[in-house]
Image (spheres, rainbow, N blue to C red):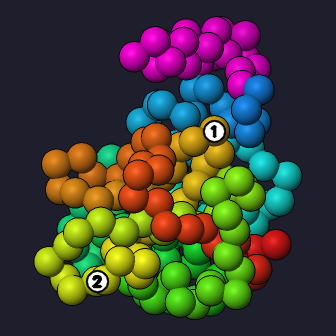
Amino acid sequence: VLLGMMSMLLGLMSNRSGGSATNSVGGASASGSTASTGTAANSPKVANPKVQKLIDSAVSKQGSPYVFGAAGPDKFDCSGLVSWALGQAGSKVGHMNARGLQAHYKQNKVSKEELQPGDLVFFWSPNDRGIPPGQASHVEIYLGDGKTMGTDNAKEGAKVEPINWSTFIGGARPPELQ
């Protein structure tokens, strides 16, 4: 709660000064890490224009409804949002589910310690889809500063949220965006 209030205050200060409040961890915009306005202006800033496009595209979909199997442009499931944002950034990977993305990027794994904004983050939790431990049942986009952009349920829709380290099983860096 305190972190959210500090981020909101930094965001307000940034808006008044016309600048941007950047925190010291990962260079993420404090206002972008908690706001849910669905605009690219709230995205963390990175030097790589392709990665920036991935992040901006995903963050612009905050508030979009979650619908299992949907891949945009107005409603998404987790892999649909990631696949759509990858496409907006110039990737030709197409729509794949979380396990498909994990398998596609298996040569591009990154550890928790190596994560950078724009990396894909994979999760596993018990499920009724027959996905065994170690294989991704969920995927999101890492924004830096311990935050991700994703969607996983109909009540919340697409949103920026703290990463769930308890179900995290790995990350990957799409080479076509590097």
| Disc 1: CA contacts within 10 A as few (<14), some (14-19) or many (>=20) | many
In the image, is residue 41 above or below residue 166?
above
Identity of the residue drawn at 64% across and 57% down: 112
In the image, is residue 113 above or below residue 25?
below
Q: Main secondary structure of the magenta part?
A: helix
Q: Is residue 62 left or right of residue 109?
A: left
Q: Is residue 75 left or right of residue 33?
A: left
Amino acid, disc 2 = Ile
Residue 39 horizontal/vertical position (percent): 52, 43
- Of the two numbered discs 1 and 2 on the same chain, state the one appearing first in sequence: 2
Q: Image quadrant of residue 25?
A: top right
Amino acid, disc 1 = Asp
In the image, is residue 9 above or below residue 46?
above
Tag nearer the camera, 1 or 2: 2
Residue 161 horizontal/vertical position (percent): 43, 42
Residue beneath label 1, please?
145
Which dot marks residue 131?
A: 2
**Stretch of the chain drawn in magenta:** 1-23
Q: Image quadrant of residue 153?
A: bottom left
Identity of the residue drawn at 63% across and 38% down: 145
The answer to whether residue 43 shows anywhere in this view is no
Q: Residue furthest right?
A: 47
Identity of the residue drawn at 83% across and 59% down: 48
Magenta-span inclusion, residue 114: no
Residue 69 horizontal/vertical position (percent): 26, 79
In the image, is residue 116 above or below residue 30?
below
| Disc 2: CA contacts within 10 A as few (<14), some (14-19) or many (>=20) | some
Label tally: 2
At mark 1, the secondary structure is loop
